Image (cartoon, rainbow, N blue to C red):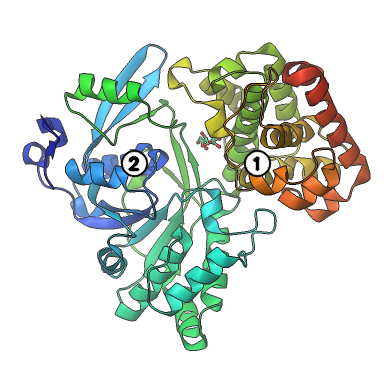
Amino acid sequence: MAARRGDVTVADRLSRAARGPAPRPGVLHLGVGAFHRAHQAVYTDLAMAATGDPRWGIVEVAPRSTGVVEALRRQDGLYTVLTRSGERVTAQVVGAVSEAWHAPSHWADVAAKFADPRIAVVTLTITEKGYLGDPVTGRLLDDDTVRADVAAVAAGERPRTGLGLLVAGLAGRAAADAGPVTVLSCDNLIGNGRRLSALVGEFAARLPAPLARDLAGWIAASVRFPSAMVDRIVPATTPADRADALRLVGAADDAVVAAEPFTQWVIEDDFAGDRPAWELAGAELVTDVGPHETAKLRVLNAAHSMIAYLGALAGHETIAAAVADPAIRTAVEALHRDVLATIDAPPGWDLPAYAASVLERFANPALGHRCDQVASDGSQKLPVRVVPTLLATSAAGRTSAAATLVVAAWLRFVVAGVDDDGRPLTVSDPARDTLRAVPASDVARLLRTAAVVPAELAADDAWVADLTARLDDLARHGARATAAALQPS
Ligand code: CS2
């Protein structure tokens, strides 16, 4: 990998010549996004440093995008993580990446990595929609994308999706008899390991019979799918981040990421073989990660989504600005009351303190986390973040006006696509176009179209009436007034 970028020579700190050799490949990661680079890669780097065990270099595989892969190749796999808090910014160079590949251009190389016995762990950050599951039922979709990928894997050709690449890679590993492997989901899904295992199983079952049978048998014997709760706020990289990396590291870094100081990783201790000593870098290995996932998704991510939709509608650009708005904070506190009444604390956690700490983290002004970034893909996110609170409160014979407001604000954001002053919003959601084809006043049909809530809830007339009333409030009075009017349930 060359250490030159245009006519700028990458400084020693981003060159292996000065830092010693890259670690040996031991982990393969699918989805080279900013979150992964500021989270799992940092834990892996620290774990290797703590043990002096260089076997856990990460083979980065990008299912689609090329930019970061090219940057990592130019920079010998090295890049900077900036940690931002208030006025303070610090830089750390991460050396855990041993290789980086763009799957569409180098599928044969990527397939060979899956079949390399040195790879003991495959990690994934492919975002909620990358799992190709129905957001409500979790079942594998049956659409053109899935059918094309099943056909590609059956024919021994290159699949296009993250899930397809994983199944093809596992099939290649089984054929090469390359040994057991752990597949570790690092996305914000409920029971992410179990869900991924089920989706891989459904995908494999759609392959032609002998391959399907052999693969299912090998997976049952050789692959584990632990669940994990991951947490660190990592906004999209900005030009200011690149300027800070240049200033602090002395190198032009096209793979830099900026993150908050807080970081957390709770992993179900269920591995098929060896793994990096992530616990030495602060990760917790536990028997059951369910309560941690539930708390994080319903307290942190649900509030994040609420702030993002109400904030964007109210004209706030960032999460920090939106959470500083007293009207929006009232709504988030109401949501937290409903959530805390319906979940169990993970062992050793103080849930009210956790909820308060999450709001403090959101208020970090240095992050510049954009509302429209967190607002993206709500049709995939709400079913795991917000809908469980609607169902839990209704099972307890109550309703959650706050959780209902999040669904209303999401619908308003996606369907109207303008803020309360009529300014256009950046709306990125796989359901956007189908939702916009439905008359905005037909709430029941909007719900059937996006299927973010289970059919029973969509058929609950009282709840649909509440949702419709909140949508009317948002349209007539705006997000701030509607949020401020939210009474604790
Ligand atoms: C955010 C998450 O973009 C989003 O939807 O809610 O990415 C959030 O920042 C992380 O889950 C924090 O760990």
Q: Which mark is residue 43?
A: 2
Q: Is residue 86 above or below residue 429?
A: above
Marks 2 and 1, how far apart at CA: 26 Å
Q: Can residue 66 be seen in this view?
A: yes
Which of the 4 quarters of the picture holds residue 178? bottom left
User: Is 263 positioned to the left or the right of 438 in the image?
Assistant: left
| Numbered mark located on residue 250 in the image | none
Image location of residue 336, percent across then percent down: 70, 28
Looking at the rendered structure, the kind of residue marked 1 is Arg
- Left or right, residue 329 beside residue 56: right
Q: Is residue 245 left or right of residue 419?
A: left
Give above or below for 336 relative to 35. Answer: above
Residue drawn at the location 58% of the way across and 44% of the way down: 293
Q: Which residue is drawn at 43% across and 62% down?
A: 160
Q: In this view, does 403 lie above or below 487?
A: below
Label 1 environment density (alpha carbons within 10 Å; few <14, some 14–19, many ≥20): many
Percent x, y of residue 176 = 30, 78
Which residue, given by chain and number where applicable, does mark 1 sit on?
385
The answer to whether the residue bearing label 1 lies less than 8 angstroms from the nearest atom of ligand 1 is yes
Residue at the image position 50 percent from the left and 81 percent from the top: 212
Q: In which quarter of the image is the C terminus?
A: top right
